[in-house]
Amino acid sequence: MKVEFVDYHAVATWSWDLGDASAAGGDDLCGICRVSFNGTCPDCKYPGTECPVVIGASCPHNFHMHCILRWLEQESSRGLCPMCRQIFTYSTEMLGDLPELTKLIEDHAAMRARGPDDDGFEQLEATG
Ligand SMILES: [Zn+2]
Ligand SMILES: [Zn+2]
Ligand SMILES: [Zn+2]
């Protein structure tokens, strides 16, 4: 019997090395979808570089990229971390600059700078 390896794909287990970030009190679950970073966000079928873990710089919270993108796309997020309500910024140490995410963060910053700084929740009043 002759066995020939035509093509071989190594299957390796991997995990994000969150290093200090997970030691600093963040857990290994995405704060938005509550799925482990070794799994994927609800948008993705397979873990991988398409959906990296975004490390919070202003707070110890980490999120799947898709999850935090989707959160920040909502105007009502006001650019804040969904966990601790600090202004969300991310560490570029591991991933470099993520233009999509940077733009959302900057848009929120501009919005905050424009509008009056009300610290309460905006009430939607029914008119008419
Ligand atoms: Zn997630
Ligand atoms: Zn994803
Ligand atoms: Zn936070």
Image: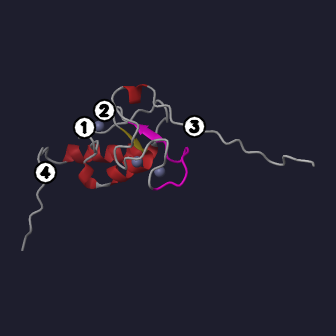
SS of the residue under disc 1: loop
Q: Is mark 3 within 8 Å of ligand 2?
A: no
Tell me the amino acid under the disc marked 3: Trp
Residue found at the very far front of the displayed protein: 1
Instruction: Estimate the spatial distance between the alpha carbons at disc 2 and disc 3, rounded to whole Å.
Output: 25 Å
Q: Quadrant of the C terminus?
A: bottom left
Magenta run includes residue 3:
no
x, y percent for residue 34: 37, 47
Does label 2 or label 1 sit earlier along the sequence?
2
Q: Which residue is mark 4?
A: 121
x, y percent for residue 103: 38, 46
Q: Is mark 1 within 8 Å of ligand 3?
A: yes
Does label 1 or label 4 sit earlier along the sequence?
1
Instruction: Estimate the spatial distance between the alpha carbons at disc 2 and disc 1, rounded to whole Å.
Output: 7 Å
Does label 3 or label 1 sit earlier along the sequence?
3
Q: Is mark 2 within 8 Å of ligand 3?
A: yes
Which residues, given as a range, are shown in magenta? Answer: 43-55
Q: In the drawing, what numbered circle is on residue 14?
A: 3
Instruction: Estimate the spatial distance between the alpha carbons at disc 3 and disc 1, rounded to whole Å.
Output: 31 Å
In the image: residue 100, left or right of residue 8: left
Instruction: Estimate the spatial distance between the alpha carbons at disc 1 and disc 4, rounded to whole Å.
Output: 15 Å
Q: How many marks?
A: 4
Tell me the amino acid under the disc marked 4: Phe
x, y percent for residue 44: 50, 54
Q: Which residue is mark 2?
A: 59
Q: Residues within 10 Å of mark 2 (few under 14, many from 20)?
A: many
